[in-house]
Amino acid sequence: MATYIYHKAHRLTQLHDEILAALPALRPIVNTNGDATVVMRIEGRESEGFLRITIPEGASERPLRALVAAHRPDPHYGAPPTASDVELLAMNEKAFRQWVARRLLAQAIPA
């Protein structure tokens, strides 16, 4: 394994997801039992801008370095939903249930 150190403002979860999306070879390998083997390890302290990324020996650092350089931290990435988000989801769910009930009733009552 090769370890690289970077000093950059980041949102760790967001950067992790960006790397895995762009470099599928670094995704965990899942066997037939459902057990996963870690291929990449990413650690960091967001408050200090410190990153340590470990990838397999022989894997190129160039695309990883480009992803880290291009990373723009989103302070809302992975944030829990706000109260208004939860209320909106509840209203949408209620409206959907009412629509389904009307459709089922319309099908059950012969014309």
Image: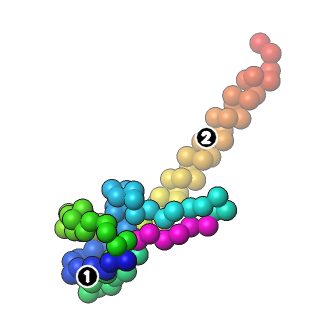
Residue 30 highlighted magenta (yes or no): no
Q: Using the numbered discs, state the Cα–Cα distance from disc 1 to disc 2 in whole angstroms.
A: 49 Å
Q: Position of residue 34 (x, y in %)?
A: 63, 62
Label 2: few (<14), some (14–19) or many (≥20) C-alpha neighbours in 10 Å: few
- Which residue matches tag 2? 96
**Residue 21, horizontal then vertical, whole percent:** 37, 56
Instruction: Bin the neighbour count of mark 1 within 10 Å (Cα to Cα): few under 14, some 14-19, many 20 and up.
Output: few
Task: Give me the residue at 55% from left, 46% from top.
Answer: 92
User: Toward the viewer: 110 or 26?
Assistant: 26
Confirm whether residue 77 shows in the render: no
| Secondary element type, mark 1 | strand
Answer with the quarter of the image where residue 59 lies. Answer: bottom left
Q: Earlier in the sequence, mark 1 or mark 2?
A: 1
Q: Is residue 83 above or below residue 96?
A: below
Q: Amino acid at mark 2?
A: Phe
With 49 as the anchor, is 14 left or right in this view?
A: right
Is residue 39 part of the magenta span, yes or no?
A: yes
Q: Which residue is drawn at the image coordinates 77% and 12% (left, top)?
A: 111
Residue at horizontal 56%, vertical 61%? 30
Q: Which residues are magenta?
A: 35-40
Q: Which mark is residue 78?
A: none
**Three-letter amino acid code at the position of disc 1:** Ile
> What mark, if any, has residue 5 been given in the picture?
1
